[in-house]
Amino acid sequence: MTILLDCILVVISIIILWKGADWLVDSAAEIAHSLKVSDLIIGLTVVAFGTSAPEFAVTISAAISQQTEISIGNVIGSNIFNLGFILGGTAIIRPIITSPKLFYRDGMILIMTTILIFLLFFGIDGWTPDDSFTKLEGLTLFILLFGYITFLFIKKDPPEEVHPHTANLKSYAYFFVGLFMIVYGGHLMVVHASNVARFMGVSDWVIAVTIVAAGTSAPEFATSISAALKGRHGIAIGNLIGSDLFNLLGVLGLAGMINPTMIHQDIYLSVFNLVLMVGVVLIMIRTKWRISRMEGVILVLINLFRWYFDFAA
């Protein structure tokens, strides 16, 4: 009877995710145009911050309890998942239109940030003599995030089109309710899908790198697909690029300030894989200014291969 309830709650969590994403995308578009900024700006900032909430919760909780591998691994793993399964899966359902601004501004900032993280973890940045991640480095990342967000709103892009509806109090209410629904829906899915997996004899490690990884990224997935289907490409891809930046600069920066740590050797390969993944995505963004269905398939396959080698190791 308990397993039946878990299965029902998994289905309910998926419904909550999709309905919450539907409300979030529509209200975000209205808010963006009322603030006279583009869908991309809203996707990179407000929507990205909201959909990164599960990563914030998991990583900060792990940092406080001194589970450093989980706190750092969650960020790196989530970013790779975002750029592989979610961006790839969204492009398979509907090709995503990109832009020079996304490539030259936000894409370049993402690749430079990822390389900076790689250098900080290796301890060859000149700040620390060993492979440690210090409070100063965490604070620096957090300041960089604040600077990036400030820059986006100072140099704000105008809306791509005139939206038929102007944001009102109802728009903001739908935005926050939708945001709560996708965060709660993701949490609900992780808990009850994990129970179903354990009942079927799946190990905790497999659950961690599949269901938990997918569950904490479920808000990004639901939001990006909903946005792409509505033709809101700026929100669809801006949500993922922005979420990755929030994870690297905000979540990781805050985790470093809470609990400075030594970097485990296994993390280097994961960060290096993330650098490569960002590079591949940038090439796809630049090619014909769209991410095609075939490119989406390639991104998903790259993630499947990474999972295979993780299990094989």
Image (spheres, rainbow, N blue to C red):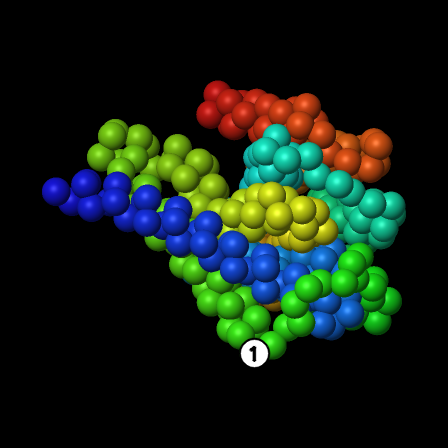
Q: Which residue is drawn at 22% across and 35% down?
A: 199
In this rendering, the answer to whether 197 lies above or below 75 is: above
Q: Position of residue 25 (x, y in %)?
A: 59, 57
- Which residue is nearer to you in this view: 68 or 124? 68
User: Which residue is tagged 1?
Assistant: 169
| Quarter holding residue 206 | top left
- Secondary structure at badge 1 equals helix
Task: Answer left or right for 141 relative to 308.
Answer: right
Callout 1 amino acid:
Leu
Where is the N terminus found, in terms of image quarters?
top left
Q: Say whether residue 191 is visible.
A: no
Task: Answer left or right for 282 relative to 237.
Answer: right
Most distant residue in the left direction: 1
Q: Where is residue 217 in the image (x, y as percent from the top left)?
A: 51, 47
Q: Where is residue 112 in the image (x, y as percent from the top left)?
A: 80, 48
- Which residue is nearer to you in this view: 56 or 269? 56
Q: Which residue is drawn at 71% across and 30% down?
A: 292
Q: Which residue is drawn at 71% across and 72% down?
A: 34
- Which residue is nearer to you in this view: 210 or 180? 180
Most distant residue in the front direction: 164
Instruction: For label 1, count other residues whose C-alpha is less than 10 Å away and answer few (under 14), some (14-19) or many (20+).
Output: few
Task: Answer left or right for 101 relative to 266.
Answer: right
Q: Residue at x 78, y 69 (%)?
A: 36
- Which residue is nearer to you in this view: 212 or 42? 42
Q: Say whether residue 89 is visible.
A: yes
| Quarter holding residue 140 | bottom right
In this rendering, the answer to whether 296 lies above or below 254 is: above
Task: Answer left or right for 255 relative to 143.
Answer: left
In this rendering, the answer to whether 117 lies above or below 210 is: below
Most distant residue in the bottom direction: 169
